[in-house]
Image: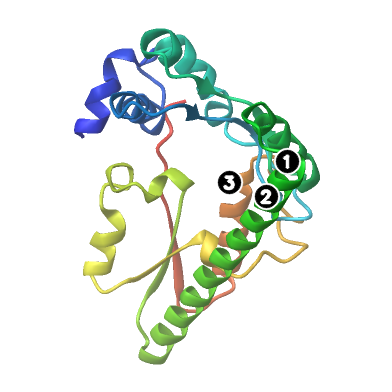
Amino acid sequence: TALFEKGVATVMSDNICFPGKLVHGHIRDLVEKKVDRIFYPNVVYEHQEQACADNCYNCPVVTGYPDVIKSAMNPEEASGIPLDAPAISFKDPVLLERQLARFVKPFGVGRSRSRRAFRQALKEQARFKERLRLKAQELIAHAAARHEPVVVLCGRPYHIDPLINHGIPALMADMGVHVITEDSLPPARREALTNSRVLTQWAYSNRIMAAAEYVGAQEDMRMVQLTSFGC
C-alpha cells in the first residue's frame, strides 16, 4: 500500500487499472533508490503460445504505459534518471535479439556478447517454465491420489503481486485447495482455440481460454479467473 501511495499523485487517469496505477509507485521507488537507469520497454507482442490464435498482442495499457510514465513523471527531467523504453516484440525471437542488440550497443556491448546473453536468457526461461510445469504436475498427481480439489487460478502476470491478487491464492490454499496457475499447465495443443467464437488476438486472454479448454477436460479441476481491469 505504501508503494502505491508513493506515486498516486502522478496518476493521470482515475479509471486506469490498479496495476497501472501501481507502476507510478514502483518508478518513484526506483528514483528514490537513485538507480542509474530505468529499463521499461514498450512490449507490443508477447510470445504466441497457441498456433491457431489470430495474434498475440499485449494489453494496450502495458504496451503504452512507459510513454504515460514519461509524460506523468519524467524521471530524467525530474531526477536525472533516464527511462529507456525501446519497442520490443516477443513474437519473433530473431527480431527480439536484434532489437535488444541495438538497444545495448550504445552502452559498449558488442553483438556477439549480447547474442550470447540473449541465448542464455532464453535457455534459463525455458528451464524455469519446465520446472514450474513439473511442480504443477506433481501437485496435480498428489491431489488426485487423495481426491483433493485443484483450482487453476488464472490472471495476468501482475497478479503474482500480493497487493493486486488481494491474498486470494493464500486464502484458497488455507481452505485446503491446491492452487496452480494457468502458465504452469502443459503447453497448449496446437489446435487449442480453433473453435473459439471470439477474436483470439490478446496473448494473455488466449492463454486463459486455452487453460479453460484444458480444465474443462479434467474431472477434478476447477478454474478461477482474477481480473483487475479499469478500462
Label 1 is placed on what type of residue? Leu
Regarding mark 1 in the picture, which secondary structure is present there?
A: helix
Does the residue at mark 3 contact the one at mark 1 (Cβ under 8 Å)?
A: no
Observer-side mark, 3 or 2, equals 2
Mark 3 crowdedness (10 Å alpha carbons): few <14, some 14-19, many ≥20: many
Q: Quadrant of residue 58?
A: top right
Q: Quadrant of residue 218?
A: bottom right
Classify 10 Å Cα crowding around label 1: few (below 14), some (14-19), many (20 and above).
some
Image coordinates for residue 35, horizontal then vertical, percent: 38, 29
Query: Residue 71 versus residue 146: which sits nearer the camera?
Result: 71
Please tell me which residue lies in front, 157 or 88.
Answer: 88
User: Going from the N terminus, do you reach mark 3 or mark 1 first?
Assistant: 1
Secondary-structure class at tag 3: helix
Residue 184: give x, y in percent of width and height: 52, 65
Farthest residue, direction front:
108
Labels 1 and 2 touching (C-beta < 8 A): yes
Nearest to the eye among marks 3 and 1: give it: 1
The residue under label 3 is which amino acid type?
Answer: Tyr
How packed mark 2 is, by other alpha carbons closer than 10 Å (few <14, some 14-19, many 20 or more), is: some
Mark linked to residue 204: 3
Using residue 191 as the reference point, say whether residue 118 is left or right of it.
left
Total residue callouts? 3
Q: Nearer the viewer, residue 121 or 93?
A: 121
Taking the spot 43% from the left edge, 43% from the top edge, the residue there is: 158
**Which residue was labeled with disc 1?**
96
User: Who comes first in sequence, dot 1 or dot 2?
Assistant: 1
Q: Residue at x 72, y 38 (%)?
A: 110
Label 2 sits on a secondary structure element that is helix
Whole-percent x, y for residue 207 in the image: 60, 53
Residue at the extreme bottom of the image, as rendered: 145
Question: Mark 2 highlights which residue?
Answer: 118
